[in-house]
Amino acid sequence: VEAHPIPEHPRPWRVKDRAVLVGDAAGYVTKCSGEGIYFAAKSGRMCAETIVKASKNGTRMIDKADLMEHIREWDAKYGATYLVLDLLQKFFYTSDAARESFVELCEEEYVQKVTFDSYLYKTVQGNDPMGDLKLGWKTLQSLYKNNNKQPDPMRTLA
């Protein structure tokens, strides 16, 4: 039995000739939660709809350009979601101080609302410039605090 890690970001190429990757094979898995079932089903359906339309209900053979239309539609709808998740992971999972800051920010009601809405609707939510600015400021404050504080003393075992 062989296993291969599931890619956690869209593959750099997802179309080859008249074949297209969808779901886990295309890398449509969210990094933070590992969720992929919704994106697998959605990408398969979107691809099938593109093929039916491009083939004129089966009367025309599709080609790579037709499948690339599916990729453009997918990226337009979900590309920002994967970009934000990738940036969050690269920014907050780099050090203990950054992880501590991330935990602190998760206590914010705005973060909880945006996270819940983004998970529910499967695309990046928010669109509150003031909320985003406040969150950005709190992020900088938290990172400064956690990067400059002395580590807690080691505990001794009894």
Image (cartoon, rainbow, N blue to C red):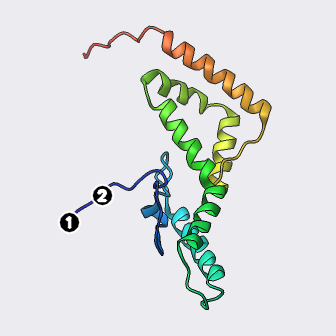
**In front of the other: 157 or 15:** 15
**In front of the other: 58 or 126:** 58
Left or right, 26 with respect to 156, comes to: right
Tell me residue 100's x, y (percent).
50, 25
User: Does residue 122 lie above or below 70 as drawn?
Assistant: above
| SS of the residue under disc 2 | loop
Q: Quick one: label 2, few (<14), some, or many (20+) residues within 10 Å?
A: few
Tell me residue 89's x, y (percent).
49, 37
**Residue at 40% across / 12% down in the picture?**
152
Quick one: which residue is furthest to the bottom in this view? Answer: 59
Q: Quick one: label 1, few (<14), some, or many (20+) residues within 10 Å?
A: few
Q: Mark 1 touching mark 2, by CB under 8 A?
A: no
In which quadrant of the rendered view does residue 107 lie?
top right
Q: How many marks?
A: 2
Tell me residue 59's x, y (percent).
61, 91
Amino acid, disc 1: Val
Amino acid, disc 2: His
| Residue where numbered disc 1 is placed | 1
Tell me residue 155's x, y (percent).
32, 13
Quick one: which residue is furthest to the left in this view? Answer: 1
**Residue at 46% across / 72% down in the picture?**
17
Left or right, 151 with respect to 92, comes to: left
Left or right, 130 with respect to 152, comes to: right
User: Does residue 106 lie above or below 158 as drawn?
Assistant: below
| Residue where numbered disc 2 is placed | 4
In which quadrant of the rendered view does residue 42 lie?
bottom right
Spatial CA distance of label 1 from label 2 is 10 Å
Of the 4 image quadrants, the one containing the N terminus is: bottom left
**Residue at 55% across / 85% down in the picture?**
61
| SS of the residue under disc 1 | loop
